[in-house]
């Protein structure tokens, strides 16, 4: 399996529209870690609307991370 490398700004806003659900499971914790390193303590994750598949995955990931408050 070949891993793609994505480059995007670490600015506290993560737009997941261009990612597949299987990609975000690793992406979200890594993005939050990078934000924390840059002292960005509020992060907005955009998962979109629709059937809510991405939303459920995002919430599932976030509720398991101790550094996430809400």
Image (cartoon, helix red, strand yellow):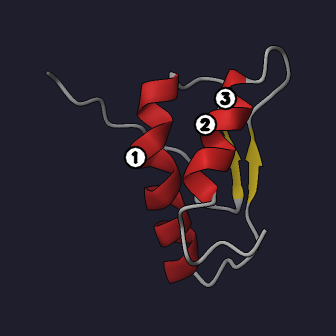
Q: Residue lying farthest left?
A: 1
Tell me what residue is drawn at x 43 percent, y 32 percent.
23
Q: Tell me the residue that label 2 is attached to.
A: 57
Q: How far apart are labels 1 and 2 at the CA level?
A: 12 Å
The answer to which quarter of the image holds residue 67 is bottom right
Badge 2 density bin: few <14, some 14–19, many ≥20, Cα 10 Å: some
Q: Tell me the residue that label 3 is attached to.
A: 54
Q: Residue lying farthest right?
A: 49
Q: Residue lying farthest top?
A: 51
Tell me what residue is drawn at x 58 percent, y 60 percent.
10
Mark 2 and 3 residues: CB-CB less than 8 Å, in contact?
yes
Q: Tell me the residue that label 1 is attached to.
A: 26
Quadrant (top left/top right/bottom left/bottom right) for the N terminus: top left
Tell me what residue is drawn at x 32 percent, y 36 percent.
5
Q: How far apart are labels 3 and 1 at the CA level?
A: 14 Å
Can residue 36 be seen here? yes
The answer to which quarter of the image holds residue 30 is bottom left
Image check: 59 left or right of 70?
left
Q: Dot 3 lies on which element?
A: helix
Tell me what residue is drawn at x 65 percent, y 72 percent.
68
Image check: 13 left or right of 32?
right
Badge 3 density bin: few <14, some 14–19, many ≥20, Cα 10 Å: many
Q: Dot 1 lies on which element?
A: helix
Percent from the top left, x then y, of residue 11?
67, 62
């Amino acid at each position: 399996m070949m891993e793609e490398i994505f480059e995007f700004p670490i600015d506290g806003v993560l737009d997941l529209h261009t990612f597949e659900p299987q990609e975000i499971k690793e992406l979200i914790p890594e993005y939050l870690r990078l934000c924390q390193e840059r002292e960005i303590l509020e992060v907005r994750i955009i998962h979109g609307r629709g059937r809510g598949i991405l939303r459920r995955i995002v919430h599932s990931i976030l509720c398991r991370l101790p550094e996430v408050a809400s």
